[in-house]
Image (spheres, rainbow, N blue to C red):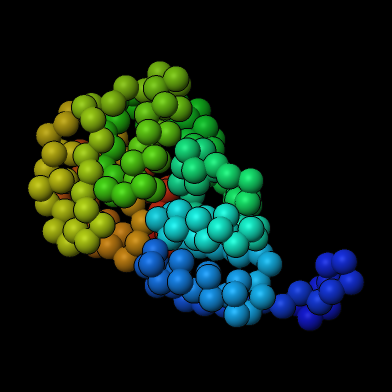
């Protein structure tokens, strides 16, 4: 079916690379795709951190970058440039859609537990901005944990001690399942609502 797709009479060819969510690898692959494969459009990736580096490759090579599904608002906000086009929603838009439900069904006091990277920090800022306008208050500043965290106990203890009605985990990557397993093990859901809408299909299955 893809072979039948043409743009301006030219067949579309898709060349894939697996960057393993490593920014340096992705930037190197993007340069190779442009310089050796003749790529005119770059598309990807799930990791917002990866896309920041690929944005620079697109600018340097003067090619188009379609961002999908990386959801950091910074990609087309703070990092705006004329080569980058978002073709998916971002977390700012997620929170706009979530706000009416949150205020009616969850509670007024939230605490944020976020990954300590561009995605986590920009998404936490989006959550604070959007949900605050909807009347939700936040118990302290967001709690940030490193990407490589395997033991979330100290961070989840801060969540439990916050006095919040709900915790909003903003997390992505291969430690997501570990985080939600430990949320369950520590009984976080018995003390407050756990908002799990901003994560992967693996979380839904768990």
**Which residue is drawn at the image coordinates 18% and 28% (left, top)?**
163
**Which residue is drawn at the image coordinates 52% and 61% (left, top)?**
57
From the viewer's perspective, is residue 139 above or below residue 17?
above
Q: On the picture, is 193 further left or further right than 150?
A: right
Q: On the picture, is 6 further left or further right than 153?
A: right
Residue nearer the viewer, 59 or 16: 59
Please say whether residue 69 is visible from this viewpoint.
no
Residue nearer the viewer, 170 or 24: 24
Residue 184, picture quadrant: bottom left
**Which residue is drawn at the image coordinates 81% and 77% (left, top)?**
11
Residue 115 at what x, y percent from top left? 29, 49
**Which residue is drawn at the image coordinates 22% and 53% (left, top)?**
146
Residue 104, picture quadrant: top left
Residue 202, picture quadrant: bottom left
Q: On the picture, is 189 further left or further right than 136?
A: left
Q: Which quadrant is the N terminus positioned in?
A: bottom right
Residue 6 at what x, y percent from top left? 84, 72
Please say whether residue 64 is visible from this viewpoint.
yes
């Amino acid at each position: 079916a893809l072979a039948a797709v043409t743009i301006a009479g030219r067949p579309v060819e898709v060349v894939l690379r697996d960057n393993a969510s490593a920014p340096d690898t992705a930037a190197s692959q993007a340069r190779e795709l442009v310089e050796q494969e003749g790529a005119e459009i770059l598309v990807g990736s799930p990791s917002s951190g990866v896309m920041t580096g690929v944005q620079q490759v697109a600018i340097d090579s003067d090619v188009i970058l379609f961002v999908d599904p990386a959801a950091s608002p910074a990609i087309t906000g703070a990092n705006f440039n004329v080569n980058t086009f978002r073709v998916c929603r971002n977390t700012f838009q997620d929170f706009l859609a979530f706000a009416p439900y949150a205020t009616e069904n969850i509670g007024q006091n939230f605490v944020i537990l976020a990954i300590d990277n561009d995605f986590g920090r920009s998404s936490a800022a989006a959550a604070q901005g959007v949900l605050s306008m909807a009347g939700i208050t936040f118990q302290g500043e967001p709690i940030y944990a490193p990407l490589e965290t395997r033991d979330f106990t100290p961070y989840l203890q801060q969540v439990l001690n916050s006095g919040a009605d709900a915790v909003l985990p903003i997390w992505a990557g291969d430690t997501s399942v570990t985080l939600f397993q430990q949320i369950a093990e520590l009984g976080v859901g018995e003390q407050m609502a756990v908002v799990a809408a901003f994560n992967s299909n693996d979380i839904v299955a768990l």
